[in-house]
Image: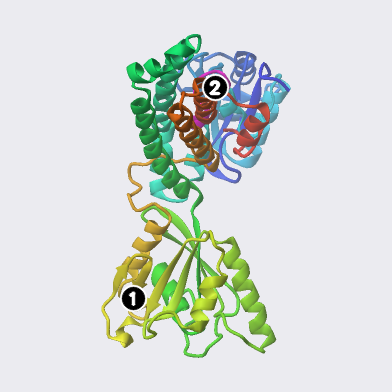
Amino acid sequence: MGDSDTIAAIATPPGRGGIGIVRVSGPRTDEIVVGIAAALPAPRIATLASFHDGEGRVIDHGLVVLFVAPHSYTGETVAEFHGHGGPSVMRLLLARCTDLGARIAEPGEFTKRAFLNGKLDLAQAESVADLIDAATATAARAAARSLDGEFSREIHALVAALTELRVYTEATLDFPEEDIEFLREGDVVARLDALRQSLARVRARAKTGALLRDGLTVVLAGRPNVGKSSLLNCLAREEAAIVTPVPGTTRDPVERRVEIAGIPLTIVDTAGLRETGDEVERIGIERTWSAIARADLALVLVDARDVGPNEEDRAILDRLPGDLPRVVVHNKADLAGVQPHAGGRDVWICARDGAGVDLVERAVLDAVGASEGTEETYLARERHVAALREAAAHLLASGSHVASTPPAIELFAEELRAAQDALASITGAFSADDLLGAIFGRFCIGK
């Protein structure tokens, strides 16, 4: 299999539909179009045609659209056959394409060819899959901004600034006696600070974008009867969990998907945490701790009537993973005679009537660093966030080298190079084949 092959795939979802599309890309596309539709249509004009099999029998009647290289999605000559969306019709059309010399496309291979042919950079190519998979309208808009190149433009601007500083730095390496003059005249410290600030802004937007793409798992934890199930029902806007005054009602984790500010959340209601001799309840408590271990955020519910965490609440808080963000939700504020309010990572609410639940939602966004809003962000992946984090670490290290006496210019230059390589990996300027295989292998076939 090579990039010079002609590939074909059904580009519409499996099952029955009003319209189905078979897409072809590669050097034998013209030959395949003639073999199926009898003639080449004018480029970019949807043309009515009959689709024939190898014996001249009509498979279907539909539209054929031809995109001549390089003016196509992949950069190669591409054809699309738009027929009736029955599975049998689509399979017959695809079989005819393979008879005429095409092979079945691998997952994501059309988009991979678009990347290899310079039609998209790697971040844009990934946003194609993210747009298809977007779980919320906000995530879809963010993916569209990435596909439009907004994220890539931010990265290119950082790389350009780094390149300019690297060029200046490399030009001074032959004159080590001029190190101090290099720092003063080039205003290197100020330029480095500006770079780090720009990178910090991009990192913040990318982190929010990663949340939009991947979502969060939020676990509700606490003693029995502190209102975990009531809070789940408030957040889910439905009676998702049974609420009773009987301790231990919730035995197995109950999950619901909700959306806060466009970020998809999986809320997990869990069994109350306490010492128990009931074997079934004990198993439920073990599952609670397993859910906590997998969570991105913990909402720890306590009774608002308690003045400070009691011994049981403190034991729960102390056992949480040290790196797990948490918000302490003081429920039953009405019984404690206080109004719903928030202070730091503590929120006072009444889950029974929903008072203060909006404060919990705001605290969740604050805890994960998404309080700035999501409407203007772009979608990002964990590998993008990791690359930005690596670049930030190299820029931080470069600052120590340039501040030393005398300045370690060679080490400064090396850290700048490493930071640039990390940023370039986002858009695919430097990408290993195994990385490309992992990325495009997760795409759907036909895209």
Determine the secondary structure under disc 2.
Answer: loop
Drawn side of residue 32 relative to residue 212, left or right: right
Name the residue at 63% across, 87% down. Answer: 276
Query: In the shown orientation, is residue 138 left or right of residue 281?
Result: left
Judge the density around disc 2: few (<14), some (14-19), many (≥20) Cα neighbours within 10 Å: many
Residue 322 image position (x, y, % from top left): 54, 62
Q: Residue at x 61, y 34 (%)?
A: 440
In the rendered image, the quadrant that contains the N terminus is: top right
Does label 1 or label 2 sit earlier along the sequence?
A: 2
Q: Callout 2, which amino acid?
A: Thr
Vertical relation: 201 (above or below) 370: above
Residue 442 pos. (x, y %): 62, 39
User: Which residue is under mark 2?
Assistant: 74
Q: Which mark is residue 205?
A: none
Relative side of 35 to 407, left or right = right
Quarter occupied by the C terminus: top right
Q: Which residues are magenta?
A: 115-124
Instruction: Report the mark closest to the observer, 1 or 2.
Output: 1
Q: Position of residue 409 (x, y in %)?
A: 49, 21
Q: Is residue 349 above or below residue 248?
A: above
Q: Disc 1 designates what residue?
A: 349
Query: What residue do we see at 66% from left, 88% from top?
Result: 278
Quarter occupied by residue 196 = top left
Left or right of residue 172: residue 38: right
Amino acid residing under circle 1: Ile
User: Can I make out residue 57 in this image?
Assistant: no
User: Whole-Å distance between the Cαs marked 1 and 2?
Assistant: 54 Å
